[in-house]
Image: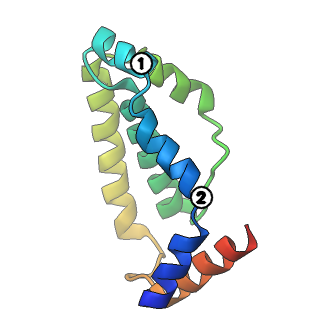
Amino acid sequence: MTPDQVNEVWNLLDRDYLAGVVRAGAKPVFAALSGAHGHDTKHAMHLIRLMRMGLEVLTSSELLVRRPDAEELVAIRDGVLSFDALLAKACDLEGRMEAAVKEASLPADVDRERVDALALELMRGA
C-alpha cells in the first residue's frame, strides 16, 4: 500500500470501536474456561476454524464464512476437547493442508496491488 492508502484506511477505521476492544481486554468467561481446561479454549476454537478454512480454500478455492461446523466449534470453545485431542486434530489438519498445497491450483504469489485496491473499495463502501 502507498502511504496515502494507509492513511485512508486509518481514517476509515472506527476508532471508538478499536479503543473499546483495547480497553475491554480479555473477557472473564474465557479466562475461566482457560483455567478450567488447562488451555485457551477460545484460541483453540479459532485454531481449528482457521485451519479448516485454509484447507477449504486449498481444496475448493472457496472461503466459507458461515460455518457448517459452528456447533462443533462452539463445543471446542466450551472445552469439550482435551489438549491432547485438540493437538491431534490440529496435527491431522496440518497434514491434510500440506498435502492439499501440493495439489492446489491457487497462484504461487499474491497480487498485492489488487488486494489493496479491493480492500480500499470495500472500506469506502462500508
Is residue 52 visible to us here? Answer: no
Please give the name of the residue rendered at 41% of the width and 21% of the height, measured from the top-left corner.
30
Residue 28: image tag: 1
Q: Measured along the vertical axis of the image, is residue 92 above or below residue 38?
A: below
The x and y percentages for residue 96 are: 36, 50
Please give the name of the residue rendered at 47% of the width and 63% of the height, measured from the top-left corner.
58
The x and y percentages for residue 61 are: 57, 66
Residue at mark 1 to residue at mark 2: CA–CA distance:
25 Å
- Quick one: label 1 or label 2, which is nearer the N terminus? 2
- Disc 2 marks a residue whose amino acid type is Asp
Q: Name the quadrant of the N terminus.
A: bottom left
Residue 14: image tag: 2
- Disc 1 marks a residue whose amino acid type is Pro
Q: Is residue 108 left or right of residue 75?
A: left
Choose between 122 and 76: the one closer to the eye: 122
Q: Measured along the vertical axis of the image, is residue 67 above or below residue 8?
A: above
The kind of secondary structure element at disc 2 is loop
